[in-house]
Every structure is written in structure tokens, then in C-alpha cells.
Amino acid sequence: IKQRVRVVIVEDEKLHEELKAKAVEETLKEYTFVDSTVRILEVFSYDNQSVIIYAYCNNMPSYCTCLCRKDLVSVQKEYNKEAMAVATSSGQRVGGLCLKCAQHEAILAETHSNVHVQNACVCVFVRERDELMTVLCSLRAGQTEAQQREWATYQQVKQAVEMAEEANLEKTRALVQCEHFHNELTRQRERLERELASEQEKISQAREAACLESKKEKEVTSLSQRVAEFEGLLERGERDRNSLNGQLEEAYKKLTAQETDSSKGSDQETCLKTLILQFRMVTLVAQKSHTLLLNLARASCTSLIYMCIHLIFCSLSLCRQEKKAVEHCCGEDMAALTFQAQRHERELTQTLQQMEAQHERSGGYALLSCQAIGAKLEKLARSTEIEQLSLEKEHLQESAEKLRGRCEEMGEQCVQHGRIHQRMKQRLQQLDQHCQASSQQVLQLLSRQKQLMQERQQLAHDTHNL
């Protein structure tokens, strides 16, 4: 019996040491979100083991008493058998007891005399067992409450983790959307810049084309004016040549008439011949001057005018010479010719002055019209540029307002997520504190259990001594 009791006590001590080691390991573990579920399962297994050990410890006194009773019954049966054998053989033996029988008789007497002591010990064991059962029930109730609280905290932590994951997912989605909007905005800006550059190139090309067209129009108008002036000068020169030819023919006729009429002397004949030769030379010079006048009129207007003036002066000088030569015979005709030549000279100078003034006026008017057209074109280009830029500005402002509103909404969402994250952090800190408090309670319960087991061992030792 003593050996069996010792074996049971040794096993109980081993189980207590294992429980203590497990409790120390659990207290040394860190409280993390990932290890919370594992810790709860280990606590559940630890609780189950502690319940089994408590039941084993509570049943140990009854088990020991049962073993003692069984051994006592077997000893009594053996003693009865030996007593019967002694009674049957008592007639053949001498009175008295042997050493073994005396020891058995002393043991039986001691057992019969210590029955009330055993009953008292059994009552004490029963009372202690009841107290231990009440304590065990209270510990089980506290353990179930702790398990429920830990399960509730586990659910809260799980919900918090899920909410944190959802918040992180929303944050990543918002960041992805922000990046997408930023890329879209950059693409739109680049596209608008390319369109603006192309429009500016088109406007510059249109401006250059308009300038070229205006220059061409100016050149065409100036060339048309010069052609008209040259045509007018040619017509006037032809008219003047025709009139001069007519006058020269009249003078030639008069001279021929005077030749026929005059037969006065050889000096006058030679003079007339020289006059005729000079007249022919003048006609040839007039023809040459006419051809030169045509060529020079085609080349430039100014050279034509100067050549015409030079020819007029030449013709005037020739006319004056002719006038001096035939002054004695045709004074009145020569005076009329000189007056007509002077009149033609004055008319030509007046026409030249008028043409120069008209040319200056037409050039100034063309310059003013070109400046006005250029100003109008610049105004139109600026107005079109301003309209296009205003439309692009409105479009960009609308898109910027939309993006600004979206960014503000996302900022508010980020602030809300941050607040939720802060609340979750505070809640997790509270849960951590609660877990620490529950672990301290478990340690206290383990210390209480250890104390009770020590008391239990002391009681077992006392019973063993008894």
C-alpha cells in the first residue's frame, strides 16, 4: 500500500512540475495578434489537462482508502484462514503463540483498536475533498469566464484585424486611383500642350502665309500701277512724237516751198541745204530717240522720263537752231513752234509732278492699307488664340476641380481610416492589457493551485504517517 501511495504521489508531483513549466512558458510568450489564436488553443488544452489532474487528485484519497480496505480485507481473510487452521490443530499443540502468530494477533488488535482513528481520518479526507471540489468548481467557473472573455477578445481582435486589412485595402485602392488620376492628368496635359504647339504652328504658318499674300498683293498692285504709268507715258510719248512729226513735216513743206520760191543766191541755197540735212538728221535722231524711249520705258519709268525730257530739250534746241536759221523767212511760225514746245515742256513737267505725287499717295495708301490689314490679322489671330486658350483653360479648370474634389474625398477617407486605425490601436492596447491581466489571474490561480497541491501533499504525508 505504501509503495502504491508513493507511486501515486510521485506521478502527482511530476504532473504538477509539468503544469508549472507549461505555465511559465505561457507567461514568457509575447502577446501578438498572430499567436493569440494559438495561445487560446493552448490555454484550452492546458485547462483540460488541469481539469483532468484536479479530478485525479480529488479521486486519489478515495482510491487510497479503497486500496487500504482491499488490503485489509485480504489480510483479514488470511488471518481467518490461519486462525481456523490453528483452531483445528490446537489440540495437538502446546498452548502459546509462535512469533508469526503473535505478530498477526498484534496487528489485528492494533487495527481493531484504531478503527475510530481511521474513521476520523476518512471524515477529514472527505471534508477536505468537499472543500477542494468547491474550490475546483469556483476555479472552473472562473476558467470558463476567462475562456469566454478570451474568446470575445479573440473575436474582437479578429474583427479589428479584418477592419485594418479592409482599411489598408481601401488605402491601396485610393493610392492606385490617385496614381491613375495623376497619370491621366499628365497625359491630358501633354496632349493639350502638343495641341497648343500644333495650333501655334498653324497660326504662325497662317500668319506667314497672310504676310506673303499681302506682299504679293502689294507687288502686284505696284507692278500694275507701274505698268499703267508706263502705258500712259508711252501713249503720251507717241502722241508727242506724232505731233512733232506733223510739225516737222509742215516745217519741211514750208522749207521746200521756200526753196522753190527762193532763188536768190548760192549762200541761201547752201544754207537751205544745210537746214534740210539738219532736218533729216533731226528726224533720224527723233526716230532713234523714239526707239530708245520705248526700250527705256520698258526698263524703268524714271529713265524713260529723263530720256523724254532730254529728247524734248534736244528737239527744242534743234527747233531753236532751225528758228535761228529760218528766222528771217518764217519768224511767226518759229515763234508758234517755240511757244508750243514750251507749252509741251510745261505740260510734261506738270504730268511728271502729278505722277510723282500720285505715286507717293498710292504708296502711302498701300502702306496704310497693309498696316491696317496686318493689324486686323494680328487681332484675329490673338482673338482666336485667346478663345482657344480660354476654352482649354475652362476644360482644364473643370478637370482640375473634379480632381481636386476627388483628392479631397480621398483625403477625408484617409483621415477617417487613420482615425479608425488609431481607435483599433487603442482597442488592441486595451486587449493587450486585458490579456496581461488575465494572464496574471491565471498565474495567481496556478499559484493557488500549487498551494492547494502542497497542502494536499502535506495531508497525504500526514495520512501516511498516521
Image (spheres, grey):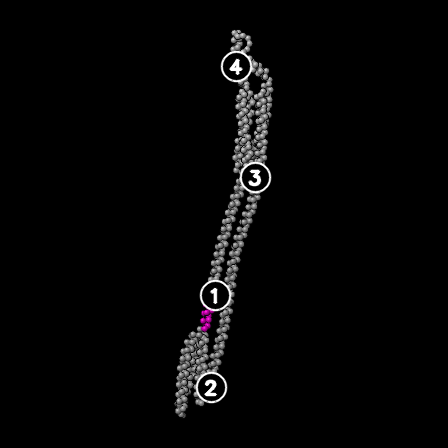
Crowdedness near tag 4: few (<14), some (14–19) or many (≥20) residues, C-alpha within 10 Å: few
Task: Determine whether label 3 and label 4 are within 8 Å by CB.
Answer: no
Residue 217 in magenta stretch: yes
Q: Amino acid at mark 1?
A: Cys
The number of numbered badges drawn on the structure is 4
- Horizontal and vertical percent for residue 305? 45, 77
Q: Which residues are magenta?
A: 208-226
Residue 24 in magenta stretch: no
- Label 2 sits on a secondary structure element that is helix
- In the picture, measured across the screen, residue 16 lies left or right of residue 269, that is right
Mark 3 and mark 4 lie on one chain; the one further toward the N terminus is 4
Q: Specify the principal SS of the magenta part.
A: helix
Query: Label 3, on which residue?
Result: 428
Query: Label 2, on which residue?
Result: 335
Query: Label 1, on which residue?
Result: 211
Q: Amino acid at mark 4?
A: Glu
Gap in angstroms between the C-alphas marked 2 and 4: 202 Å
Q: Residue at x 55, y 19 (%)?
A: 68
The vertical placement of 7 against 290, above or below, is above
- Label 4 sits on a secondary structure element that is helix
Mark 2 and mark 3 lie on one chain; the one further toward the N terminus is 2
